[in-house]
Amino acid sequence: HAALRRGVYHVISIFLIISGFLRAKNPRSESDIPFLLTMCCLLAIAVLPPPARILDVGTGSGILAIAAAKRFAREITASDIDPIAVDVARTNAEINGVAEYVRPFACPGLDDAEIEAAGPFDLIFANIVANPLIEIAPDLSAALAQTGNARAVLSGILDVQKDDVAAAYAAFGLTVVDALPMREWVTLVLSRR
C-alpha cells in the first residue's frame, strides 16, 4: 500500500505547488479555487479507509477518480453531465496508468441505470457547487451504502452555504462528521447517523 499512498501524496504535492504559485502571484486569485477545493477532496482520499465501491460525481478531468484509483486500487464509477469532460477523464486515467480502474461515463445527475447497477457506494465524491449538491441530495444519499463506514465527500461549498448543504443531507439521514475549511470554502465529509 505504500506505493498507492505515494501516488496520492504525489498528486497532493502537485496541487500544493501549483496553488502556492498561484497565490504567490495573486494572493486572492479566483483561479486557484478549483485547486483548493480539489486539495480538500484529495486530503480526504488520503485519510479515509479503503472503500469497496467508489463514485465520483461531476468527475470533470477525473483527478479525484484517478487519485482514488491510485490510493485504493479499486474500480471507480466516474460520472459527469459533460461528454467532453468524460473523454478528458478517460484520457487522463490512461495517461496516469489507472484506466483499468476508472470508468467514466456521461449522465445527468445520479438517476442512471449504470450508477444504480454499480452501487451502493461506500465512498462518494461530489466536487461541484452548493446548489447542485442540494438538488442531488436525495439521489446521492440513496446511492450511499447503508453501512456506518460509508462516506460522502462534498466540496465546492462556500462557508456561508455549509449549513444549507448539511441540512439538505440531514433530511436523508446523513450527518457531517468532518469539515475541511480552505479560505472561504469548506469540504464536508458525511456519514449515516
Image: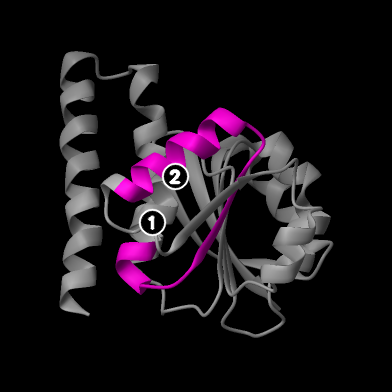
Q: Is residue 123 left or right of residue 65?
A: right
Q: Position of residue 63 (x, y in %)?
A: 38, 46
Q: Residue at x 72, y 38 (%)?
A: 132
Q: CA separation, marks 2 and 1? A: 7 Å
Circle 2 Cα neighbour tier, 10 Å, few/some/many (<14 / 14–19 / ≥20): many
Which range of residues does the magenta coloring cover? Answer: 69-94
Q: Nearer the viewer, residue 105 or 1?
A: 105
Is residue 182 something that shows in the picture?
no
Q: Residue at x 76, y 65 (%)?
A: 116
Q: Secondary structure at mark 1?
A: loop
- Residue under pointer 2: 90
In the image, residue 170 sits, relative to residue 32, either above or below, namely: below
Q: Position of residue 75 (x, y in %)?
A: 48, 68
Q: Amino acid at mark 2?
A: Arg
Q: Is residue 43 left or right of residue 145?
A: left
Q: Quadrant of residue 134?
A: top right
Quarter holding the N terminus? bottom left
Q: Amino acid at mark 1?
A: Ala
Contact between marks 2 and 1 (CB within 8 A): the answer is yes
- Tell me which secondary structure the magenta stretch mostly adopts: helix
Q: Position of residue 119 (x, y in %)?
A: 69, 71
- Residue under pointer 1: 99
Q: Is residue 63 covered in magenta?
A: no
